[in-house]
Image (cartoon, helix red, strand yellow):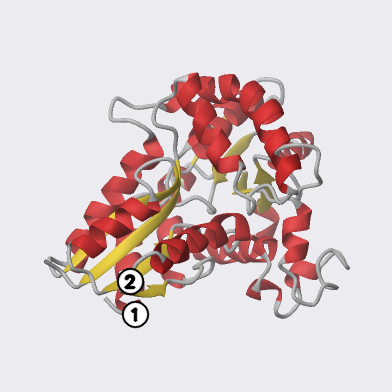
């Protein structure tokens, strides 16, 4: 029995790379109104009649390219992180991994913590930067679970850690072996968001996209996902001793016809090749665990494009922080500060 618990909240993964499992996962994921913020009937039609039927076979093919004998990399690495964090916090604290979509669900993980006697639970959303479609959705699911219990445990939440020194040091430590070959340029690629999501997060209603340097204005990092990503880039570049002209920030994984924040990673690859860059390194600091977006989208497809049609000579992808000791130490410190 332990009266202290930690929930690691991750996005999720299909049960297998089979098309049917991927289709079910996409339907659950994209039916979340915080992910596709369209009216319910419109979202249902888009997800069930357009995206899931046509995207599932392609996504299943991508998942098959990265699937391991142990299962989905995101889940395997998440379980390794949970085990390492539990070891760092000691036997008095129980740690569980929960997925917002797919299994194990956030509710199942919270049930296990409560069933083990946890009277205080620290929730750690495994997203360095704040977005309603990620952190907001995970916390909404946690709150829904809490409301269903007659005597829920006390809950506290670790805030976004986009520029926290411990996280920045962990990203830098994971990247240093890759940068030892001294690439000409370093591209930091983050998951994209539709511009309307970023605008909705602007409490003033007048700052976002009002001027070219809006993400650098005072207070921008309080709520703006893009500003937080740029802050991560600056902090990681400083930790690695990279000159600003050797670093770019891009956004990947755009979906649909809506306008997404930019510049896109695909556009930057073309631009960098046009500038004569041949040796490129890529970091993905919006992901704490290697997954479809890092291993397949960047590690396979972007690599093939860079070394093929774009004429590059070297393409090095730095691993995410995963369950590395610096990241585990950082999370343990954050959990202790939050009350475990």
Q: Which residue is mark 1?
A: 337
Q: Nearer the viewer, mark 1 or mark 2?
A: 2
**Disc marking residue 14:** none
Is residue 238 placed above or below 338 in the rendered structure? above
- Residue 21 % position (x, y): 46, 26
Task: Count residues near mark 1 (Cα–Cα under 10 Å), then give few for <14, some for 14-19, many for 20+.
Answer: few
Left-right relation of 296 to 113 = right
Q: Secondary structure at mark 1?
A: helix
Give the mark nearer the N terminus: 1 vs 2: 2
Q: CA distance from mark 1 to mark 2?
A: 27 Å
The foreground one among 235 and 200 is: 200
Q: Which residue is mark 2?
A: 150
- Residue 329 % position (x, y): 30, 65
Residue 93 appears anywhere in the view: yes
Is residue 276 placed above or below 150 in the rendered structure? above
Q: Quadrant of the C terminus?
A: bottom left
Q: Residue furthest front?
A: 150
Left-right relation of 126 to 119 = right
- Residue 277 % position (x, y): 69, 37
Q: Residue visible at 51% across and 22% down? A: 60
Q: Secondary structure at mark 2?
A: loop
Q: Residue visible at 76% across and 34% down? A: 270
Q: Residue visible at 44% across and 33% down? A: 14
Left-right relation of 242 to 116 = right
The foreground one among 246 and 198 is: 198
Quarter occupied by residue 74: top left
């Amino acid at each position: 029995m332990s009266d202290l618990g930690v929930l690691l909240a991750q996005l999720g993964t299909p049960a297998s790379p089979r098309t049917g499992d991927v289709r079910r996962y996409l339907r659950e994921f994209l039916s979340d109104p915080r992910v596709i913020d369209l009216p319910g009937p419109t979202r249902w039609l888009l997800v069930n009649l357009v995206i899931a039927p046509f995207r599932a076979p392609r996504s299943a093919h991508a998942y098959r390219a990265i699937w391991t004998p142990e299962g989905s990399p995101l889940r395997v690495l998440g379980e390794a992180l949970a085990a390492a964090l539990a070891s760092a916090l000691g036997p008095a604290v129980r740690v569980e991994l929960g997925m917002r979509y797919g299994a194990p669900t956030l509710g199942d993980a919270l049930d296990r913590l409560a069933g083990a006697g946890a009277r205080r639970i620290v929730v750690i959303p495994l997203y360095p930067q704040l977005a309603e479609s990620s952190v907001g959705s995970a916390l909404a699911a946690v709150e829904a679970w809490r409301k269903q219990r007659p005597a829920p445990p006390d809950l506290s939440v670790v805030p976004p850690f986009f520029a926290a020194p411990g996280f920045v040091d962990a990203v830098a430590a994971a990247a240093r072996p890759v940068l030892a070959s001294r690439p000409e340029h370093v591209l930091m690629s983050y998951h994209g968001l539709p511009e309307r999501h970023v605008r909705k997060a602007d409490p003033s209603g007048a700052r976002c996209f009002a001027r070219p340097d809006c993400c650098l204005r005072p207070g921008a990092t309080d709520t703006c996902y893009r500003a937080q990503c740029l802050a991560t880039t600056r902090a990681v570049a400083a930790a690695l001793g990279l000159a600003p002209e050797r670093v770019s920030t891009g956004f990947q994984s755009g979906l649909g016809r809506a306008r997404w924040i930019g510049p896109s990673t695909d556009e930057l690859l073309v631009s960098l090749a046009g500038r004569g860059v041949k040796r490129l390194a890529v970091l993905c600091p919006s992901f704490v665990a290697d997954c479809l977006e890092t291993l397949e989208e960047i590690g396979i497809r972007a690599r093939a494009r860079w070394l093929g049609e774009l004429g590059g000579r070297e393409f090095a992808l730095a691993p995410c922080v995963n369950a590395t000791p610096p990241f585990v130490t950082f999370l343990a410190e954050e959990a202790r500060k939050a009350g475990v």
